[in-house]
Amino acid sequence: MALSIPTKTVDLTDNVDMDAVPGIHPALDTPHLRALVHPERLLWSAAELRTLTTTVATLFRSELTEITRFASDYRWWSRLALNDGVELWLLTWLPGQGTEPHDHGGASGSFTVVRGDLHEEYRYPRRAIRAATRRTGTAIGFGAGRAHEVRNRGTVEAASVHAYSPPLVPTREYASLADIPDEIPPLPAGSVRIRDRERG
């Protein structure tokens, strides 16, 4: 059995600021969102993450629209919430923008499309590569051990809300989804003391 080596590990803790305080994006900092991110819950299931991204995409639609930005030379993102159990992000996608094939280092995840359509190809170890178009309002939750790539193949802008638990686990990129190993080992989670990585 050949072991596949990921092409790159992406660590969201690269820009650690030990004085930063985790919390909520100022545009969404309400008692309702603070309750939704359950600071006492240290590990979220894929179903719980899916409920979170769907709820945030629905209840905070106008706030998300206000903070949404698009950039032609990179995919824009902003952290919406971070605590010991979960991280929540807003990502935007111009036509043609997408990710490389990657896993989430052992974290469970979810995303809900807020605007536009996103094409996702995904694979679990030892299974076939599958594909789906995620339209506005569509949500998907997934457990650890899943690799995927996401791309805006449409002609209009797209945006999506993402959540991961445990938070701040680095991702691993692959040359293709065919290269993921038979087992995807977990990577260590980072500290929740991270500077907001909003771009734009």
Image (spheres, rainbow, N blue to C red):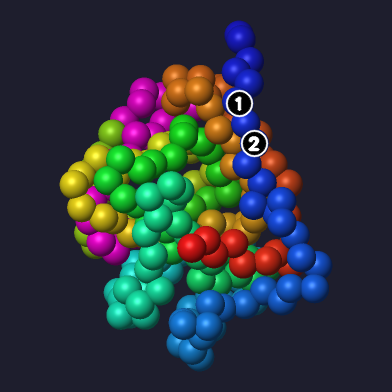
155 to the left or right of 119: left
Residue 165 placed where, x, y %? 58, 57
Residue 159 placed where, x, y %? 33, 59
| Image vertical order of residue 151 relative to residue 69, above or below | above
Determine the residue positioned at 39% across, 65% down: 69
> In the rendered structure, which segment of residues is drawn in magenta?
112-130
Determine the residue positioned at 57% across, 22% down: 181
User: Is residue 57 one of those drawn in magenta?
Assistant: no
* Disc 1 element: loop
Image-quadrant location for residue 8:
top right
Can you identify the residue that label 2 sits on?
9
| Image vertical order of residue 194 relative to residue 143, above or below | below
Which residue is at the far left?
A: 155
82 to the left or right of 102: right
Can you identify the residue that label 1 sits on?
6
Q: Camera-side residue: 70 or 65?
A: 70
Label 1 to label 2: alpha-carbon separation: 7 Å
Image-quadrant location for residue 119:
top left
Image-quadrant location for residue 114:
bottom left
